[in-house]
Amino acid sequence: CVTGPATVIQAIAAGRHAAESIDSFLTVGYAKVHREDYSCSRGSLEDLPRWMYEDTPRLPRTVMPALDPEIRKKNYAEVELGLSEEQAVAEAERCLQCGCKSRYDCDLRNAASDYNLEFKSPDYDRPFFPITDDHPFITRDHNKCISCGRCITACAEVEGPDILTFYMKHGRQLVGTKSGRPLEHTDCISCGHCVNACPCGALRYTSEKGKVFRALHDPSKTVVAFVAPAVRAIIATRYGISPEAATPFIAGLLKQLGFDKVFDNAFAADLTIMEETTEFLDRVTGQGVMPQFTSCCPGWVNFVERRYPEIIPHLSTCKSPQMMMGATIKNHFAQMAGLARQDLYVVSIVPCIAKKYEAKRPEFATDGIPDVDAVLNSVEMLEMMDLKLIDPADVVPQEYDEPYRMVSGAGILFGNSGGVAEAALRMAVEKLSGVPLADHLDFTEIRGFDGVKETTIEANGVKVRVAVISGLHNAEPIIQKVARGEEIGYDLIEIMACPGGCISGAGHPVPEKIDSLEKREQVLIDIDMSSKIRKSQDNPDIMKLYQEFYGQPNSQLAHELLHTHYYQ
Ligand code: HC1
Ligand code: SF4
């Protein structure tokens, strides 16, 4: 039985609260449905790609949160009294008590508005369980949990770490960790897909909107935003605007929100290619541990540190583009603009919850001042737009700011699985052959949604074998071979924790249709195809940054500001 929020609302509006209806809602995991209560959803089951919910464990009703017996009795009485549907409607209090604070992608709220239902804060008449706050950004409110198991499935089947499970406490079935340890002390990679999969707001991530609004209103701060490659894919698909129009739309929106400067993180993706491909070419020509794994996905880096620390020497030492951009703004831009570090407030806008975790790592701060002060995901950016009552039709498109205005198509492709490897190949082939790469820029065999993709290129007698993996469960067989020191037949391996790469990050709105991820991928491919600059090494603003500040890729200053170390 799969029931969408609209069905729940129709039942509330029609006063159909007989036990049979309640039971059928409980079967699909909607808790406590009666006329004054509701279930809450960030999207119905049908809205999610099949892989996110099929095989979700279904629970016997007996372990579902108990309904207040009085309510049950009342609903039975209604049936026994034989009220007509009309009488029931007239009698119904017609209100929806919403348990989560989500304003986006909530079909339940939309359907409730269609039926003119009132919204009320929920009264919990279920047993109260303290909120579990055992992770820096993720909380679990067991009072709202309906034991649908989608968070557990998302962790095991979508992303791969597989650390969540059900456990029983005080007669209730709750979600916890398999090891029983606090979430932060498990192999949790902080990707947030459990939060994204939760249909009732029981799992939540900490929003950073408040502190960003405070910074925007602080006259002593210069507030700078930079935007991840994948965010434009959401804007284009959500508002039906062309891929090319999405980038200036975001710059215009952020300026309207009050940011002083807006940069594009695809610029730092280009910088990453300069650093990471230089490192790779050094390794491939005999100076380092092979194969080399990419390091721009913080979910992947967390996974290596927590579960497979023995392969750390294979990880590129490059910081992610987010952290390269933060370090560059807090050092180079601050110097250029004559600003003290503490007067610059830097906000990264991403599709990812693991990036919130990454920005708080102590090695990415100097004298207690972080390189990136706050990380908003794309949903939070849309919520800020809503809170400021900005109509998308009124957003005036703008250019990104100097000195990091130019970005290459290769940098934009970072948001798709295969994009980092493709951008690296566009540089590696050129450097190995010594001839500018004019044609064959598209490495289509490593695009798309397959969990493991591969290609081999040959330039000047050097063969480079590349693997591209997304979804950590797809990566584990290869990681285990590398950990055992076995030859795996690859030189460069791109790994992104989320299936399909950052376009399916958990900080994006829940995809509406199964094909929407493909549309997101196509937006980034179209932007790359129409870009004047398609190779990171051709980006004139990158060249200027090296000339004026970093010297050359992998220079001493570059190592200080753009490279990092990992924890065993
Ligand atoms: Fe990503 Fe990346 S592509 S990790 O997915 O390397 O978040 O978009 O910003 O840092 O550039 C995310 C996206 C993002 C980094 C880049
Ligand atoms: Fe974040 Fe992208 Fe990695 Fe997903 S793939 S955890 S969105 S960086």
Image (spheres, helix red, strand yellow):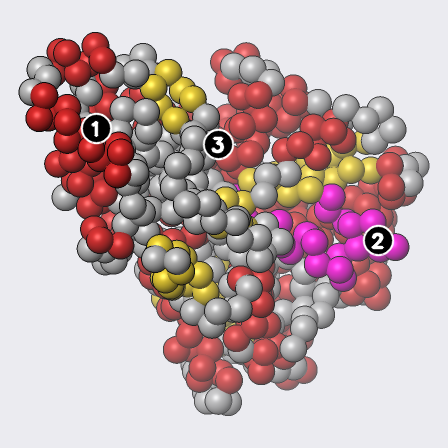
Asked where in the image residue 487 lies, by quadrant, the reply is bottom left
> Mark 1 — residue?
74
In this view, 186 is above or below 378: below
The amino acid type of the residue labelled 3 equals Lys
Residue at x-position 74% and y-position 44%: 373
Residue at x-position 65% and y-position 19%: 256
Magenta-colored stretch includes residue 15: no
Residue at x-position 46% and y-position 40%: 508
Q: Secondary structure at mark 1?
A: helix
Magenta-colored span: 350-373
> Mark 3 — residue?
101
494 left or right of 559 in image: left
Asked where in the image residue 159 lies, by quadrant, the reply is bottom left
- Quick check: can you spot residue 73? yes
> Mark 2 or mark 1, which is nearer to you?
1
The amino acid type of the residue labelled 1 equals Lys
> Mark 1 or mark 3, which is nearer to you?
1
> Mark 2 — residue?
368
